[in-house]
Amino acid sequence: LAAICGRQVDVVTFHESMNYFAESFNLNIVEVIQKDPGVEPDGKHLQDVINLCKKRGVKIIAIEPQFSPKAARTLSEAIPGARLIELNPFETADRRDLSADLYERVMRKNVQAIVQAMEGAE
């Protein structure tokens, strides 16, 4: 956690589900892959995101375990040095996984993914 504090990091997220998490950890969501829930992005949107990432130097692209990573992979392949990380917005959970500490474990895993991506992007 100390690795992220005080540093703003630009990221692309899968959709608009990580805003509170991003605010808590000084992440700047520069764009989202899926603008409309359930609607895959078209080629123009993907190209716009690629261009924006190249211009701003964005190297972190977040996918979510609940959705296909296909569009995010397209971005990461087109952006030199880009890294895919999994961030779980914790919108769904399997009943078998429910426990008192599940939310904390998921958020810790999210933070760890960001820290590792930042270390690799430097």
Image (cartoon, rainbow, N blue to C red):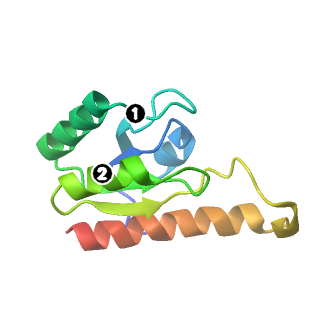
Q: Which residue corresponds to the image point at 40% horizontal and 33% vertical from the top-left?
A: 41
Going by the numbered disc 1, the residue's amino acid type is Pro
Q: Position of residue 18 (x, y in %)?
A: 53, 44
Q: Mark 2 = which residue?
A: 74
Give the structural element (helix, strand or loop) at label 1: loop
| Quarter where residue 32 is shown | top left
Question: Camera-side residue: 84 or 69?
Answer: 69
Tag on residue 41? Answer: 1
Point 45% across, 29% down: residue? 35
Q: Earlier in the sequence, mark 2 or mark 1?
A: 1
Q: Residue at x 22, y 32 (%)?
A: 48
Q: Is residue 96 above or below residue 57?
A: below
Classed neighbour count for the residue bearing mark 2: other residues with Cα under 10 Å, few (<14), some (14–19), many (≥20): few
Position above or below: 21 against 16: below
Judge by depth and name the residue closer to the eye, 74 or 2: 74
Q: Residue at x 58, y 58 (%)?
A: 65
